[in-house]
Image (cartoon, coloured by chain):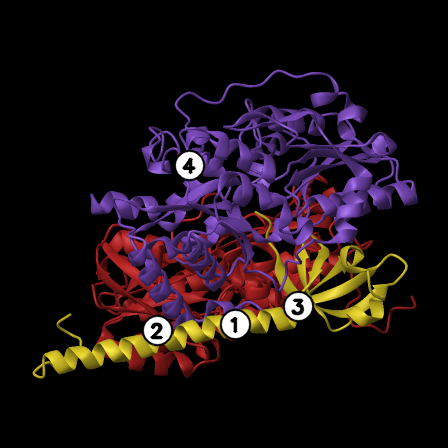
Amino acid sequence: MCLGIPGQIVEITDAPRQMAVAEVSGVRREVSLAPVAERPLTELLGEWVLIHVGFAMAVIDADEAAQTLIALHDLGEAQEALEAMAEGERAFADPASDGGDSA
Amino acid sequence: MRYVEEFRDPKAAKGVLGAIARVAGDIGATAQDSVRIMEICGGHTHAIFRYGLDRLVHEGIDFIHGPGCPVCVLPMSRVDECVEIAQRPGVIFTTFGDAMRVPGSQKSLGQAKADGADIRMVYSPLDALDLARRNPAREVVFFGLGFETTTPSTALTLQQAHRDGVGNFSVFCNHITVPPPIKALLDDPHMRLDGFVGPGHVSMVIGIHPYDFIARDYGKPIVVAGFEPLDLLQSVLMVLNQIRDGRAQVENQYARVVPEHGNPLSLAAMADVYEVRPSFEWRGLGEIDASGLRIRDAYRAWDAEEKFGIGYAVGRAPVREPDGCECGAVMTGRIKPTACPQFGRGCTPDTALGALMVSSEGACAAYWTYGGARATEAAQ
Amino acid sequence: MTVASRPSPSRLRGGRVTLAHGGGGRAMRVLIDELFTSVFKPDSAEDQARLMTPALQQPGARLALTTDGYVVTPVEFPGGDIGKIAVCGTINDLAVGGAVPLWLSASFIIEEGCDIALLRRLVASMAREADAAGVSIVTGDTKVVEKGSCDTVFITTSGVGVIAPGDDLRAEHIRPGDVAIVNGMLGDHGATILAARGDLALSAPLQSDCRSLGHLMQAVLTACPGLRAARDATRGGLASALNEMAMAAGVSVELDESALPIRPEVRGMCEILGLDPLYLANEGALVLFVPQAEADAALAAMRSVPAGQGAAVVGRAAARGTVPVTMRSAFGGTRIVDMLVGEQLPRIC
């Protein structure tokens, strides 16, 4: 449910009505900033927001995104290390094998 | 695309899948004795099939597709009421594209349009309000549909209509809330679930605490998840870690978008415009107490149910679902879509009987489109 | 008269088409002469075109005939208009069958009240496109219908071309191991039209890919004697074209998601509206199958013409599996790419 997509606020079009233009991959659409208008609108210029049915529903937290990505990256690195280790053990157990093809 | 592509990185995916397999092994999950994880949200169901995640994860993980597709749980009677409003003289009926093909007992909105009703697809409720401003001689009705993600958008639009005095605009409110059906599922003695992947975009509005009861009262883990494939996989891993450690907590994988306490401005707009209905009918689940929202008296002039004397405003009889349609059992996770006697026979996306086959988020349509089902059949 | 100095003043009165322009009398004659025949310049004023070409005299040469009706809203959009599509679309239907397109007919259903200046632009656009493709518009028809009976203008074109002896492109000829190649970006037309309609209030720097593929197909036919089949991926997009071809050939096609040429703006539009670019319409994109050994030659031939600059291998045919078309994502998963049910609707969920 609830298709939401990150977009960047590139222009405030109507401050009293809290309207702005958001851009998603070069596609522009007017959106309402009403749900994220806790801060002054001008501070939202350049921010990335989560857009749903023409409303900016949340300001995306760049630090949180970075932390999630670091955790994911670490899992990827750990997996590569594990696979390299497993590879090493197989090669050690079966010196004739030239790789993992027989697995 | 920023915040999208990074969360589709294949190398990281390998890492998470490996970790999932290790933890699944640790807790002894097998294809026969699987860990059953319900993704509540239809958007997650869609992503699982679009990226083939159900076939990438360890065989001991079983995704159970939850009731979180607002189109799928919309009862036939409400579609009939939409059609009735749309066919009134002078009405322009506006809707999200999702609802166009959902079958009513007589016809869908798409068929009503072909029969001459003025039905238009819009991207935003604000576009419907603009349409009302541009057509002062017409009555413009917006089909308010969706969970807490979408509810603030119609609340804010109604506030705008109120402020600007746009009298020829109204909302047919079918907004529903996520926690009550989860509670209904957990109270079902036939349900066996080991944990939940929670709806990310609903939670960006309501925060993560409305799910506390799941962990506290039912002892089940729940992880609020984003919608990219890595988000989903990481959330599955977090659920598995809780199971392995014997924990039951509400965790937030989607912290870049979901604040712990939700969005105060959206919550305020919702509270201003809407109140909880005593009960609301869900397709396949029946009437659930306090699971739907209605428009408060202060906004009564913009309530289509009042304006057109329809629906809960006048008392209503439930409409029977088509014979042999097992949408209810699928939606509660009791059976897989393929176990429905109509799946792929009487019911395909071309000839959908039930809502789960109509909406692209419906478990049946997702099974059909992305091949979960047909791959399974081929294997047998 | 104040306009006496102008060489040929317009005899069309008013700025709009009226029912009188379809009535068979003098007004209709004026409309046809001034708007259509003066631009298309057919050889004969008779009711039928009379056609001859040396290519037909070769033993084994065959005529190819195709017809298509064109309706599009709006009738003018970035990168093209209904006239250009009506010419390109029919040329392309001939070209993907291996025919050299030669002649077109054009039939116009015009809504009462249609702007004459608009019609002039559409006709000029058709003539320009036909000239560039080396095709003549040799006969035609106009009808005017009451306001509300059609949307501005509908155009039907039929096309005739000649297939050289020995050429026989058919989907049934596709074999496991063959390579699927597209000529360029996918989904540009569908996304452009979505934005141009305005009701979704989306704007994007996009243009329709509307273009003729005749020269491109001739280049590939020359370079690749083993060319199996080609289809233009119009309505229903690449997904529908591939499903039809795979089913006809009795093979399965596996697409490589990361190889699909799709503009960021088209992806953005799809993400916002919940659409799949594989199903977006194209008006200048084709997919063709060649044996693996000729893949490089096909790519080089395609890239030698403007319409093939973005040529890319996107998939491969294999022995028939459970379903006609699947796609492997960069993520490692595989999914079915089915035929579209009805039209794609924008969604919020």
Q: Is residue B65 visible?
A: yes
Residue at 40% from the left image edge and 29% from the top image edge = B190
Left or right placement of residue B239 versus residue B77 in this view: left
Residue at 47% from the left image edge and 67% from the top image edge = B8
Q: Chain of mark 2?
A: A
Q: Amino acid at mark 2?
A: Gln
Task: From the image, tell me which residue sits under label 3.
Answer: A61
| Gap in angstroms between the C-alphas marked 2 and 4 | 33 Å
| Gap in angstroms between the C-alphas marked 1 and 4 | 32 Å
Task: From the image, tell me which residue sits under label 4.
Answer: B333
Left or right placement of residue B50 versus residue A82 in this view: right
Task: From the image, tell me which residue sits under label 2.
Answer: A79
Residue B69: give x, y in percent of width and height.
Answer: 54, 41
Residue at the left extreme of this rendering: A96
Residue C301: give x, y in percent of width and height.
Answer: 36, 81
Find numbered disc 4 in the image and state the secondary structure of the residue it sits on. Answer: loop
Q: Residues within 10 Å of mark 2 (few under 14, many from 20)?
A: many
Q: What's the mark number on residue A69?
A: 1
- Chain A colour? yellow
| Gap in angstroms between the C-alphas marked 2 and 1 | 15 Å
| Gap in angstroms between the C-alphas marked 2 and 3 | 27 Å
- Chain B colour? purple
Q: Nearer the viewer, residue B342 or B26?
A: B26
Of pointers 2 and 3, the one earlier in the residue sequence: 3
